[in-house]
Amino acid sequence: MLLALTTSSVVAQQSKSDSSVEFNPHWSMGLQGGAAYTLGETAFGDLISPAFYLNGAYKFTSVFGLRLGVGGITGKGYSSFASTGYEFNFVQGNLDAMFDLSALFCGFNHKRIMNVYAFAGAGLFYGFDNDEATSIKNNGDDLRYLWTDNKAFVAGRFGLGSDFRCSERFSISVEANANFMSDHFNSKKAGNADWQFALLAGVNYKFGKNNRPSASYADKLAAEKAAQEAAERAAKEAAEKAAKEKAAKEAAAKAAAEAAAKEAAAKAAAAKRSALAAENSKNVFFLINSAKIRKSEAQKLEQMVEWLKANNDYSVAIVGYADKETGNSEGNMKLSERRAQAVKKFLVDNGIAESRIATSFKGDTVQPLEGEKNRVVICTVE
């Protein structure tokens, strides 16, 4: 749910009242005061006590924020046995996740007068001075969950409130919250959670503005300006095009003729290169089960070496093979590799850079020639 709320706020960060500004994350501080009611077994008015909170908050998006607060409150209980009430003191710390419902459902508006919010979180109540309840216990009342020393209570909390905008930095808030904690809170056993409710009013101060210039709005203005400039350029180009149309046609015809000539020359050069490559490619044949380059085959390679030295823009691909009719597949694969490496070594030893040589071997898996001729390394100039 938290992910959905924060995501929705990111989508609509521009202010509803002024699209030139967008939400700006900011800190704020608030002071609240009011009345708290500790749920008990007597008249409502007998269990009301004062409540005070000091809060610091950070709003990450137009919808989501976190609030850290501390409060000092007097809690009350009532003994039906002694027909008397008692008070105890505590301080409270709380951390709340805040959700701006107005921004969530109606969009962010940096000048909205009233913003309704909800929150949920956790609190830590630290109780002390429970002397009145202790005195009642000593007089015979069975306060089953009486605590006499200082005691801490972990609480869950939630609530609803509204901020009323007074100025860019100040607002007034009205808030109702509920805190629920262990059954020991008011010293009486009830068999369920103890509850404390608070109704508060307060004043809040923002340390930064809730809005800033909108990047998306600036981008929109820039896009509109660019579109206008593009339209002006298009009109100017159209006028120039009409005046230069004849010259453009002539230039196009000339360019087409030149392109055709270049294409023909390129094809001729490619054909010549291909022919030279084919002419200087060599097949180096080997004896059965041998990777030794014979003298007659070495002469072929020497010719190819001299040609490659004279034509530095060519490279050579070496592929080793073996005769399928002799040996076995595993041995032939190794033999074809030795043959390819032997030819590569010959070329390197005679001055051809390794970067110009691509080497591979295929054993007897491919038979490019017939019969014994597959005891070969095919050297293809490229």
Image (cartoon, rainbow, N blue to C red):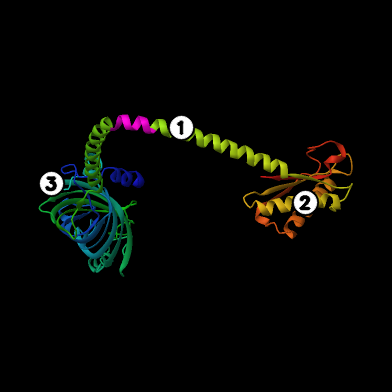
Please provide percent x and percent y for residue 339.
Answer: 80, 51
Q: Nearer the viewer, residue 154 or 44?
A: 154
Q: Cα distance, mark 3 to mark 1?
A: 74 Å
Q: Is residue 8 left or right of residue 336?
A: left
Report the residue marked by disc 1. Answer: 257
Q: Report the quarter where the C terminus lies.
A: top right
Disc 1 marks a residue whose amino acid type is: Ala
94 is within the stretch colored magenta: no
Main SS, magenta region, reads helix
Q: Which mark is residue 301?
A: 2
Q: Secondary structure at mark 2?
A: helix
Residue at image coords 32%, 66%:
151
Image quarter of the N terminus:
top left
- Residue 134 occupies quadrant: bottom left
Q: Secondary structure at mark 1?
A: helix
Residue in the image at 85% along x and 50% along y = 296
Could you give the CA–CA distance between mark 1 and mark 2, rounded to whole angstroms? Answer: 43 Å
- Residue interval drawn in magenta: 244-251
- Badge 2 amino acid: Leu
Question: Mark 1 packing: few (<14 Cα in 10 Å), some, or many (20+)?
Answer: few
Please give the label number shown on residue 113. 3
- Residue 156 image position (x, y, % from top left): 32, 54
Indicate the secondary structure of the residue bearing disc 3: loop
Q: Is residue 240 visible?
A: yes
Depth check: 268 or 78 in front? 268
Q: Choose mark 2 or mark 3, whichever is in front.
A: 2
**Gap in Å between the C-alphas at discs 2 and 3?**
91 Å
Amino acid at circle 3: Ile
| Residue 129: x %, y % from top left | 24, 69
